[in-house]
Image (cartoon, rainbow, N blue to C red):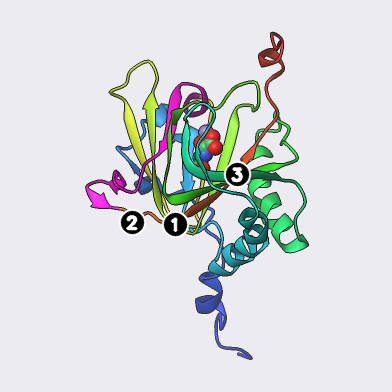
Amino acid sequence: MLFPRNPLKKCFSSLVPSLVPNPLLVFPKIPPLIQTEFVLYEDFITEKEEESLVHELEPILKKIRYESSHWDNAILSYRETEKSRWTPVNQALIERIKKLIFIPTGTVEPLDHVHILDLSKDGEIKPHVDSVRFCGRIIGGLSLLSDSVMRLTCEKNKAEVYDAHLKRRSLYVMKDSFRYDFSHQVLSEKESKFRDNIIKRDRRISIIVRCQPRPEDLVNES
Ligand code: OGA
Ligand code: MN
């Protein structure tokens, strides 16, 4: 044998993003019927890739002031922007997200720009459903810099609640029922618990990838 078996396997495996969803990061377990509609990929990007994204975003975000609250009070202590052009390395990461979440369906058109949301350590996102006028049935979110807890609550039955542990560098994908029938929120530092374990919250940047609204949702636009 010329080379030892898989000489690079050990160090390489820690650099390869995980493309297998981890259902243990959602509690309680999502019933089979809607299991594919909220999916969490742990370690979707590597530390180096996170650093590369933050390095490109930080100078842009630094120029924006944190707002104490959103126009409809949905988000507290945050700053945000939209971005459509990236360095080639980071563009490839954004494409990796779009390919994973949009291409298998073939029925949605990604929006060109992605949404960047920078929540300060004491920031939070209150329960809301994204407006159907601005985006379609699939939403993906990559978490940078901090773990957090996302709570999903069924609008028609407020007792149906799922908590998702959004780990730093993880990607979540919410679609269909979780996109339209459940509200989502990101808990404040004080409330940040997953299965009774405290989840340490810090400043968190998310990169949110969305698709074009459904044509029927644009019909009555005034
Ligand atoms: C939003 C939102 C979630 C996140 O901006 O509408 O819900 O992961 N963001 O930051
Ligand atoms: Mn939202």
Task: Name the secondary structure under disc 3.
Answer: strand
What's the amino acid at mark 2? Lys
Classify mark 3 as within 8 Å of ligand 1 or not, answering yes or no: yes
Residue that carries the numbered disc 1 in the rendered image: 146
Q: Residue at x 60, y 21 (%)?
A: 132
Q: Residue furthest bottom?
A: 2
Disc on the earlier residue, 1 or 2: 1
What's the amino acid at mark 3? Glu
- Residue 58, by quadrant, is bottom right
191 above or below 176?
Answer: below
Q: Residue furthest top?
A: 220
Q: Nearer the viewer, residue 147 or 121?
A: 121
Q: Residue 52: percent from the left, percent from the top?
A: 64, 65
Q: Is residue 72 left or right of residue 99?
A: left
The boundaries of the magenta stretch are 177-198
Whether tag 1 and tag 2 are in contact, CB under 8 A, the answer is yes
Disc on the earlier residue, 2 or 3: 3
Say the numbered circle drawn on residue 80.
3
